[in-house]
Image (tube, rainbow, N blue to C red):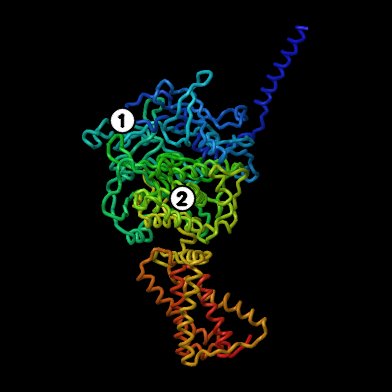
Amino acid sequence: MRWKFQAKQKLAIFLLLVTVLAVVCFYPRQKQIILPDKNYWIHAQQSFNQPQYYPLNQQINPKLYQPVGNWVGRLILPQPSELTDGQDWVWMEVEYAPDSRLIGKIARLEWQNIPPTQAYLQAVTRDINFLPSTFASQKLGIIHPERLNQVRQVGALRSLAGARPYDDVIVSLDNPQEKQGKDGEPILQITTEPLLVTGRFYGLVKILQTVENSPEYFHTQHYNPISRGFDGELEVIHIPQQVMDTRKFFPSIVKGIEKSQVGEKGWYIYGAKDGKGIFTVQGIVPRSLLQLTGEGREIGMDALLYYLRSENWRKTPEKKGKISKIAIQHTAQSPWKLGDTAIILHLFGGIGGEKAESQGVIATVTGHFSFGVAKVIHDPFTQELKFAIQYYQVYAHNPNGIIAGKHSWVDYMGNLQWGWLSTRGISDVVVKLDAVTEDYDFNGIKLSALREFLRQLEVTMARYRVGDGTGSAIVTPATSCIQDSSQALFTTIQTVKQQVEANSEITQWLDSHPNHPQTLRFRQLASLGSDLEGLLTPLGIVRADWQSNNGIIAGTGIGKTFQDRSIWAGLTSWRTMMPRQAEDELATLFFRHGADLWFLRSNQVGGWQDGILPIAPTPLLGRITFPGTQISFVSVLINRFLAAIAIPQGKDWQIAGITLLVYGAIAIPLGSYFGFLRWRIWQTHWFNYILVTLQIFVLTAWGEELFFRVLILPYPREFVHGSVWLMWAGFSLGLFVIYHPINAKTLFKAGYPLFFQPLFLILASMLGIACTVAYYLTASLWAIALIHGIVLQVWLFFLDGKAKISTEP
């Protein structure tokens, strides 16, 4: 009996081993697609772009180089058999750590088991199953998370580690919690998404000249903190030249970098030593761009409007190879001190020239928009203040392998393989507004608008990495990087409002401390939130997918997300459809609410590459301009129309009603006194009443108000000088009055000679003034069309108007 039991036991163990082997060998996964002629694979084949090119153990002089983070490592996606556990952890090869004994070790990277991280994971975890369109996109060279296809319960860490075909994602961690596993392996636990970085170390150097006969090797001199100049140690470094890819230009260029004017104040170089001990550069940052000195300075809203409309992107191709900085503030005093935090509005333009990139939208350079965060820190080399910028990139899948996630400045901009510093024009707006960036403490109840906003962005970025389970994040008019970044901002506003309204202690504290600085700051935040909500939902309609995703993004919803890719969804949030318009309008709105702004501009900086030029991003159809000007009249008209058709609020209808009463109180007695108006009801069939009413409101009132008020006048919510607005109002009123006699002689001959009578023209002028005032107050086409239509209807049906124009329908 005993031998039978042992036989059964051995059989069970054998079957278990077979089962495990079958899972490992036959776990369903797609065969990896390798396209050696596409961008990512072209660059991945270069040895200096591969992690193994850089030895793990490095001898670095700490006086010359600093680590890029407290912890630096390469993410490694678990094996297919390990991915079946439904948990969100990955391996990390430690490249730098406070304890040098851990360098080279493989650590397990996971989340701390606390409620906020669990809510975050619930919001972003998805089963991934590629769609046919995802496979088709792969064949075009777009990088999708193919190693995660058919994997269940993919969380934020695995979507980050598996974002590219190879384990080449480098990250830094701030202060992970260290533990030891059962087998003694190190475990690192985190509470926020890792930061995508370039290189392991960075230094500050001036590039002097190339090494003779070695165009990729350069003599450099390090910064000397004692002399505060570049007379420190000399060093030869390697800046590898990236190869040309399918775009027919280089993602970065080393030729002429030693001659760049931008490099006069030095370059931060990021990378590590190669096998020969030569520091090899993987990314660059121009020191002068991030310094808190050397900027121009302007004061007031007028200066901001002029800069946005006339200077920011003016003659962009001619500024190739240059940077500029300008501060536009409310006072002349510098607002910055150590530890300050600011929001970044990031925008890049297009690539023009002989090797220009193709434009996806006719007569439009779309560009790209994202948010970010800037902190004022001490430079470890110079001890001066500078900006440390991180981008929160909500980024669609692309052929270059850029990942939706949190990037350091150098990883997104200065990386030599995929960064945009060398190939595009960039406008970063640094927005300093304490009402947004400083936390609130209401007797122990903490509230942070900035932290909530960044959390919403992290959720959106994680969902983008997996395409909400489809493996593909695509760009449409309704779903794009700017639209979904704006959704995160909208959700933040809603969440903060809900937190305050649901907590009576906060409202009581605010009521009992009406003049406290924190209360004033919170009121500023509430006012900003209200205006931001209006900007993000310009038609007065909240997109259905924004409403449905609100709870899910906040970690409180259950079930599938809903994403509306229709044109209608895009129109309901049209102000954030085009990146250029979004940055301009957000910057203006923040400034209006008290923010100080710094504009950091760069235009294809680094070495010099022939064949490409930086070009400005535009609004929709923005490349159609008046000859010799930057005025994009088509996009201006489109914007004015879309802005004016927003659903009016209750107060707008009240203004329309009051305007009608005032006009009637003046026009009726005046017209009656001179015999122009008299009580006489138009006698006709009821069907004619309906037909003429439709003609009045649809063709006459709506059409004339659209042309004479909406398209000619600056939109009332735009920041335009009152004198300028009055000038345009006078011009449109003159056209409106002159139009009537001309119309009577041409298209509407039944109006002759009535439309030439002085009293008719006086009453028409009064109507034009009434509608102009109402439009200024309501900014609504519907309100002024209603005023115009009711005036015409009353005149024609009840005050002898139909008889005066002598015809019946």
Where 273 falls versus 451 (above or below)?
Answer: above
Q: Which quadrant holds the C terminus? A: bottom right
Dot 1: what SS?
loop
Farthest residue to the bottom: give it.
Answer: 675
Q: Position of residue 447 (x, y in %)?
A: 43, 44
720 to the left or right of 481? left
Q: Depth-wise, is mark 2 or mark 1 nearer the camera?
A: 2
Where 113 falls versus 678 (above or below)?
Answer: above
For the residue marked with disc 2, what is the amino acid?
Answer: Phe
Farthest residue to the left: give it.
Answer: 227
Where 216 falls versus 718 (above or below)?
Answer: above
Q: Nearer the viewer, residue 606 or 537?
A: 537
**Marks 2 and 1, how far apart at CA:** 35 Å
Q: Which residue matches tag 1?
A: 64
Residue 223 occupies quadrant: top left
Q: Are marks 2 and 1 in contact (CB under 8 Å)?
A: no
The crowd level at tag 1 (other Cα within 10 Å; few <14, some 14-19, many 20+) is some
For the residue marked with disc 1, what is the amino acid?
Answer: Leu
Q: Nearer the viewer, residue 798 or 474?
A: 798
Q: Position of residue 192 (x, y in %)?
A: 47, 36
Q: Which quadrant holds the N terminus? A: top right
471 to the left or right of 335? right
Q: Position of residue 593 (x, y in %)?
A: 38, 56
| Residue at x 39% of width, y 28% of height | 273
Dot 2: what SS?
strand
Give the number of the disc on residue 369: 2
Residue 545 shows in the view = yes
Q: Nearer the viewer, residue 356 or 630?
A: 630
| Residue at x 44% of width, y 50% of height | 507
The crowd level at tag 2 (other Cα within 10 Å; few <14, some 14-19, many 20+) is many
